[in-house]
Structures are given as structure tokens and as C-alpha cells.
Image (spheres, rainbow, N blue to C red):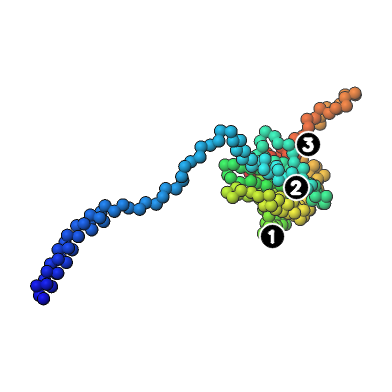
Amino acid sequence: MHQTFGKISALVVSGLLMSAPTLAWQARSAPTSRPPQSGGTQIPPDPNAPPKPKPIAMHQKLREYLGRFKGVRVDKAGKEPDTIVTHYATGEKAGTVDMVIVHSPKKKMVGFYVYDFGNVGNATDLAALQKLLLNANENMAVGSFFVDSEQDIGLKWSLRLEGGIGYEEFQTVYYGLVAAVKEFRPDVLKLMKPKDEKDKEKPKTTEPPAEKPGDSASTTPARKTTGETRQRRVKKN
């Protein structure tokens, strides 16, 4: 009995010793599973396919938006297509809103500017004017009053371009500024000197020579348009 158990033990131990190298070799030689490569076969481009449309420039997109606005007149594009001059007739005491829209690719933003609020130098009560503008800036949802280098009062707002500008967002800002002009421009102008009084304070200049009989056209050069004046002011700011 003891001899039989000893033989069995010897066979088991011998079998384990013999099978251990075999198992180790199988473990080393077993193939490793690799994930299938993605992508597959690439399809060559079709030479007859139509070219992809070029992206629309920002100023063109903004002009398309403005073309959908009611009551807004847009000037033709000039030498600087990123500057757009628009006019909106309120039909109220606020008068016409001349708004300049400027696309700044370097700053990645679009700015909105409105003037025709008067000049700080012509204020009848400077303290009351400052109080009015500060209170307006606190209460307006869209827009912020500012004073430029020439002491002219303006209203502005800006939109960032990181996420693009949609039609509804652009429309909200435009008409929000129009609403601000309607609300605050009459009150601002009440604090300005009357036009005839301002003209009296201007230094007198030499009168132009009288026209000769038969001359129907004036030799005085025409003033620059409102749009060009607004563009110059916007550039300075």
C-alpha cells in the first residue's frame, strides 16, 4: 500500500515538473489579442464633385440680417465693408436713429454705435446730465452711454464672435439700442443748449463773397454725409 502511494506521488510530482516548462512556453507563445484598427479603407475624393461653398463673410451675414429688419435703411458698402451704416426712423421725438455697426476681426467682436445725443460742452446743467447718463447705464438692458474724445455723447454695445452671432441675438441688440434712444435721447437733448444759442457762441468767420448775378449754384462745398461722420467718430473710439 505504501509502495503504491509512493509511486503515485512520484508520478504526480514528475508530471508536474515535466508539464511546468510546457505551460510556461505556451504562455509565452500564446498570441496576444489586438483591437481592430479603425478607419477601414479610405474612399478617394471624387474629382467630379462640386466644390464646397465658401463661408459667408461676417459683414455679408450682418447685411443679410439687416435686410430682414422692418423700417431699417442700410447704406451701400463703401471702401470698408466691415463698417455698416444704418438708419431707423422712429417717427417720434427721438428722430432717426443712425447706427454704425463695425465688425472687428482682430478683436473678434461686432460693435454698435449711435450718436446725435449732443456734446457735453453744450450742456446747460452738467451735473444733471451726468446723473441722467449714469442712471440710464444702470437701468438699460442693452446699451451703455459714453463720451468720446470730442466730448460727443454716444451709445454703444458689443457682441463677441467666439460662438458666432445668430439672427435673434443680433436683432435683440439692434432694437434694444433703438428702444434706448427713444427713451433717453429726448431727455438728454432737454439738457442741451438750443441750436440758435449754440450758433451765437460760435466765432464769427469771414462771410463768403456774394454771388454774381446769374450764378444759381453755390460754391460752398457740400458737407460730408452723416454716415461718413459717424464712421470717423467710431474709428477714434
- Which sits earlier in the primary sequence, circle 3 or circle 1? 1
Which mark's residue is nearer the viewer, 3 or 1?
Answer: 1
Task: Give the CA distance from mark 3 to mark 1.
Answer: 42 Å
What is the number of the mark on residue 139? 1
Q: Check disc 3 and give the amino acid type.
A: Lys
Task: Give the CA distance from mark 3 to mark 2.
Answer: 44 Å
- Which sits earlier in the primary sequence, circle 1 or circle 2? 2
Instruction: State the residue in front, 229 or 57.
Output: 57
Image quadrant in which the C terminus is located = top right
Query: Where residue 120 sits: x, y (%)?
Result: 71, 49
Mark 1: secondary structure: helix
Q: Check disc 1 and give the amino acid type.
A: Asn
* Circle 1 residues within 10 Å: few <14, some 14–19, many ≥20: few
Q: Which residue is identified by label 2?
A: 69
- Which sits earlier in the primary sequence, circle 3 or circle 2? 2
Q: Which residue is identified by label 3?
A: 204
Query: Where residue 144 sits: x, y (%)?
Result: 67, 53
Residue for point 67% across, 43% down = 61
Mark 2: secondary structure: loop
Image quadrant in which the N terminus is located = bottom left
Query: Where residue 119 sits: x, y (%)?
Result: 72, 47
Is 22 placed left or right of 58 in the picture? left
Q: In this view, which residue lies farthest toward the bottom? A: 1
Q: Is residue 221 visible?
A: yes
The image quadrant that residue 183 belongs to is: bottom right
Task: Give the CA distance from mark 1 to mark 2.
Answer: 26 Å
Count of marks overlaid on the render: 3
Q: Check disc 2 and give the amino acid type.
A: Phe
